[in-house]
Amino acid sequence: MSTLALCIPAYNAEWSLNALFSSIRKQAIPFNEILLYNDCSTDNTAGMAEEFGAVVINGDKNKGCSYGKNQLAAIAKSDWLFFIDSDDELLPNFSEVTSKWINCREAPGLVLLGYSYVNFKTGAIKYEPKYDREALLKNQLRFMIKNKIVNSSLIRRDVFYSIGGFNLDPKILYVEDRAFSIKAAMTNIVFDIEPSVCFKINFFPESMSTAKPRRWLTASLYLWEELIKKVGPEYEEDICEQLFENAVWAAKYKCWNIVRKSLATAKRIKPDQQPKTSRLFLLVYNIFPVGAFYIREWVTKIIKRKSALIAL
């Protein structure tokens, strides 16, 4: 029987550990290892995790989740690894779903697990990704570029090491999961998909992605700028699509400098490519690119405001 380590990078996570470990205790098949990397927390994260039975590794300097994940993999003895953030939770079927994969005779090197993205305060499901397995098997790098992969990879420990672990470049820090999946796709490891939803990622309105969007938007731009240097013309169109998407999100958060940089990078990569959107948008875009994003964001807000008034 293959073994599985649950790996938890954590910083000031005392408030969320009870829910996570409650979900761990509900598993029909126990984990072989439960490991937590304490990234110099100032609360009782380490003590609480130890009380719950986790093996705790204490860092001597706050270095971020990528470093913590690499440290967890380094001490793990199990055949397989699954990383979960300290404020997320497993569903009761998690261990049974993953057991099917890790004990398969011809198991892939990495499995993307199904999950729910849930509003922590309301419990409402924001979305559940439906991955196209055929697209993954056809071209795994294109799949990883086009899909925003988060902390959802069940991975063999030897494969994790062959990939080289998480990128420690601080400029990648806020999109480290996506960068890791792309790096993995550039190797010859075998991927697969588990469609069953077996854990949930909690969304917090006050989270970094909402409170400090400039960080992850800048990191995303850097990711695409670096990737185009490593791949051939075959992926130019895919990367430009992601740069346009980055511009859309940057406009939403009024990060206009990032909008300009994202569009300029796309223009440099593939001068004739345009966003896949309405003709009216493209008419403005061809005259004033940044202005097109500004106008669309302005119109979107007006429509949302009117819809809210109608709902009242």
Image (cartoon, rainbow, N blue to C red):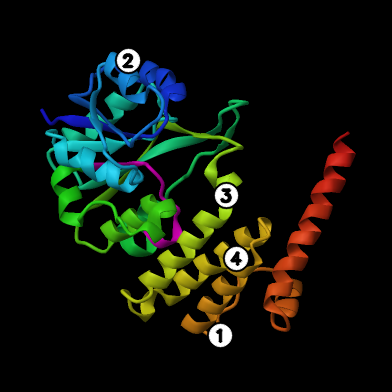
Judging by the rendered image, the residue that carries numbered circle 2 is 25
Q: Are marks 4 and 3 in contact (CB under 8 Å)?
A: no
State how far apart marks 4 and 2 are (Cα).
Answer: 42 Å
Residue type (three-letter) at the residue carrying disc 1 = Asp
- At a point 30% along the width and 56% down the height, the residue shown is 167
What numbered label is drawn on residue 272?
1
Query: How busy is the neighbourhood of tag 1: few (under 14 within 10 Å), some, or many (20 plus)?
Result: few
Q: Is residue 113 placed above or below 137 in the rendered structure? A: above
Residue type (three-letter) at the residue carrying disc 2 = Arg
Closer to the N terminus: mark 1 or mark 2? Answer: 2
State how far apart marks 4 and 3 are (Cα).
Answer: 16 Å
Side of 54 relative to 258 (left or right): left
Side of 33 relative to 68 (left or right): left
What numbered label is drawn on residue 247?
4
Q: Is residue 11 placed above or below 246 in the rendered structure? A: above
Q: In this rendered view, identify the residue nearer to me: 219 or 311.
A: 219
State how far apart marks 3 and 1 are (Cα).
Answer: 32 Å
Closer to the N terminus: mark 4 or mark 3? Answer: 3
Residue type (three-letter) at the residue carrying disc 4 = Ala
| Numbered range of the magenta stretch | 144-155
